[in-house]
């Protein structure tokens, strides 16, 4: 059963910014052929949009595991969980970040969740994952 699920979509402004691929493609291909330039511009814009959509990672908490992107952590190995937002989240991503931690950051998502790993064989002390609602993820992992 899924307790929490979130896809870390890019913000609308980033999707709009990808439109800069269109004039760049046109500048390169219009001198060769107008039709080719237009088709390449449309194809490249669609390709970039599809990549943004497909590569958006999923953060999910189920009865059995915590999943962040492609990584999975069994719930039995989840230790202490804490959520951070604002300046404290920035601090967690920067000055206090342990170099051994497993991270999944998205610059456009401001909150983070810190999930300690209870596995003596794993050198990773904790996961630090970008989420939009740290309090909801913490609540889901504590149930």
Image (spheres, helix red, strand yellow):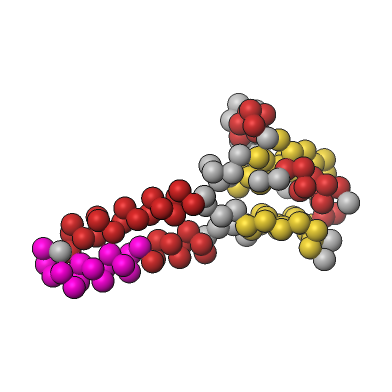
> Which residue is at the far left?
31
Report whether 40 appears left or right of 49.
Answer: left
Q: Is residue 40 above or below residue 21?
A: below
> Which residue is at the far right?
143
Is residue 90 visible to us here?
yes
Q: Quadrant of residue 19?
A: bottom left
Q: Is residue 142 magenta?
A: no
Q: Is residue 63 above or below residue 20?
A: below
Q: Quadrant of residue 82?
A: top right
Q: Nearer the viewer, residue 127 or 82?
A: 82
Report whether 9 appears left or right of 15.
Answer: right
Classify the position of the N terminus by image quarter.
bottom right
Total number of numbered discs in the rendering:
0
Q: Position of residue 74 (x, y in %)?
A: 79, 57
Report whether 28 appears left or right of 56.
Answer: left
Q: Is residue 6 above or below residue 41?
A: above
Report whether 57 appears left or right of 137.
Answer: left
Q: Position of residue 44 (x, y in %)?
A: 33, 64
Q: Nearer the viewer, residue 12 or 78?
A: 12
Q: Quadrant of residue 96?
A: top right
Q: Position of residue 13 (x, y in %)?
A: 45, 48
Is residue 123 visible to us here?
no
Q: Residue at x 18, y 57 (%)?
A: 27
Q: Position of residue 91 (x, y in %)?
A: 63, 28
Q: Residue at x 53, y 42 (%)?
A: 107
Q: Nearer the viewer, residue 72 or 56?
A: 56
Highlighted range, magenta: 31-45
Q: Residue at x 60, y 26 (%)?
A: 95
Q: Residue at x 45, y 50 (%)?
A: 14
What secondary structure predominates along the stretch shown in magenta? Answer: helix
């Amino acid at each position: 059963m899924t307790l929490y699920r979130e896809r870390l979509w890019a913000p609308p402004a980033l999707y709009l910014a990808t439109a800069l691929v269109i004039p760049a493609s046109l500048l390169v291909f219009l001198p060769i052929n107008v039709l080719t330039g237009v088709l390449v511009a449309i194809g490249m814009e669609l390709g970039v949009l599809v990549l943004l959509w497909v590569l958006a990672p999923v953060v999910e908490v189920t009865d059995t595991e915590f999943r962040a992107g492609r990584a999975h952590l069994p719930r039995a190995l989840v230790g202490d969980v804490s959520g951070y937002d604002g300046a404290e989240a920035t601090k967690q991503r920067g000055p206090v970040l342990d170099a051994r931690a497993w991270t999944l950051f998205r610059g456009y998502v401001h909150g983070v969740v810190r999930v300690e790993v209870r596995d003596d064989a794993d050198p990773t002390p904790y996961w630090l994952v970008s989420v939009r609602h740290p309090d909801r993820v913490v609540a889901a992992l504590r149930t």
